[in-house]
Amino acid sequence: MKQYDYLIVGSGLFGATFAYKARKAGKKCLVIDKRPHLGGNVYCESIEGINVHKYGAHIFHTSNLQVWNFVNSIVPFNRYTNSPVANFKGRLFNLPFNMNTFYQMWGVTTPVEAQTKIDEQRQEALHTMQKAGVSEPRNLEEQALLLIGRDIYETLIKGYTEKQWGRKCTDLPAFIIKRLPVRFVYDNNYFNDKYQGIPIGGYNRLIDGLLEGIETRVNTDFFADRTHWEGIAERIVFTGKIDEFYDYRFGHLNYRTVRFEQQTLDQPNYQGNAVVNYTEASVPYTRIIEHKHFEQFGSEVYDNPKTVISREYSTEWQDGMEPYYPVNDTVNNALAEKYRQLAAAEPNVIFGGRLAEYRYYDMAPIIEKVLNIQI
Ligand code: FAD
Ligand code: UDP
């Protein structure tokens, strides 16, 4: 009989939700994390009384009522609605692409006028593709031109996307852009989901609620003493990097990462919105996050005379950096599949989450997955 039923490696949303469920099922768990805090990428640091999203802005959104009820049972969520603004050479546009954007771009005021304008531009894209003898968009540029036309592509998509991915739009897969909504109504809500918000009091409350009554250790790397950790529990839940678990035997998986330049400012309101995207190529960062707007609304913004902002610089990942976005190109997907096959045959280890599955998951699907695991 070992000391614990489960050793959970990683205290992000996957590990913390698993630990919560296991505890409810009467199992004894230990959660370890190599970072100096719990919570993985949703961790927030309180600076000047503002919850700063240390690993990038996190907005919870889902259409799954079971998931929404579950997270709200741990901590109630606020009414934050993501509505980013794009800044292109000082001109501002609402996102996602909707009637407000079309008005700002062309001065059109009705859905019919907007549709006509976009159709004209799409026709151009269709002709070019027909001339080249292709029927399906071969890359992100062709997809965007076909979806929304040249004006919006060149103003709001090209620069931002090339900064974010560090590659030309003509070298990126078309699917990346398919998830951006195009709407012929005046609606700046970025997500199509039924429910969205931020935990009242910040994400640490969610993590603390999930991990209440569970033994945890931070600054503890599984690989620093693997034999010891493998010996103390009946089963392991592993949410770290899958290639590292297998000692990189088939090679290293690649990631994109983000560098955050954080500043505290002596002013109550820097940009009037949580998220402002900088869509021109010559501005080196992709966006600026002003954290207080996730939790303070209207005049509450002025209750605190200070504000904290983060500029986000998207960069190629190297060893020692935080791995954020799996690069789901053909080479990396094939490599990940080889590791996943090894993982599937592992009798006592459950691999879960962004890094262990090498898949791009939002928060809600992570929770949904764990809620569906039989413990
Ligand atoms: P993580 O949160 O990465 O947790 C894994 C944990 O394992 C980490 O704490 C790590 O330190 C620990 N670990 C790794 N290796 C070891 C080891 N060897 N020993 C001990 N511990 C280890 N989702 C949304 O729904 N909305 C958003 O707006 C959103 N924005 C995002 C923005 C950015 C920049 C990023 C990167 C992600 C965003 N996400 C968003 C996705 C969200 O962060 C993930 O879905 C979620 O955090 C995944 O949880 P996880 O437990 O799989 O991974
Ligand atoms: N995108 C863009 N301009 C913007 C915002 C997004 O061109 O102002 C593109 C970009 O290619 C990005 C994709 O849309 O990769 C998806 O954006 P989303 O914000 O949904 O993705 P995330 O940043 O969460 O990966």
Image (tube, rainbow, N blue to C red):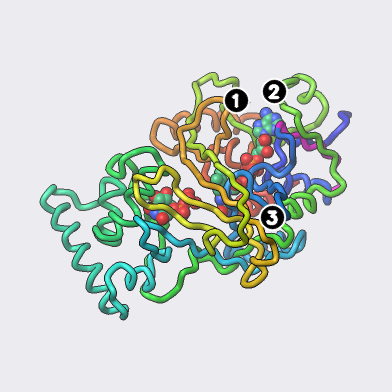
Mark 3: amino acid:
Ile
- Tell me the CA gap for discs 3 and 1: 35 Å
- Tell me the CA gap for discs 2 and 1: 9 Å
Residue labelled 1 has its Cβ within 8 Å of some atom of ligand 1: yes
Q: In this view, does 127 lie above or below 38?
A: below
Position of the N terminus by quadrant: top right
| Bounds of the magenta segment | 25-34
Q: Which residue is drawn at 34% across and 70% down?
A: 104
Q: Which of marks 3 and 1 is in front?
A: 3
Mark 2: amino acid:
Phe
- Tell me the CA gap for discs 3 and 2: 34 Å
Residue labelled 3 has its Cβ within 8 Å of some atom of ligand 1: no
Q: In which quarter of the image is residue 87?
A: bottom left
Chief SS of the magenta region: loop
The residue singled out by tag 1 in the image is 244
Q: Is residue 70 visible?
A: yes
Name the element at disc 1: helix
Q: Nearer the viewer, mark 3 or mark 2?
A: 3
Mark 1: amino acid:
Glu
Residue labelled 2 has its Cβ within 8 Å of some atom of ligand 1: yes
Name the element at disc 2: helix
Q: Quadrant of residue 268?
A: bottom right
The residue singled out by tag 3 in the image is 50
The residue singled out by tag 2 in the image is 223
Q: Of label 2 and label 1, which has the lower sequence position?
A: 2
In front here: 67 or 10? 10
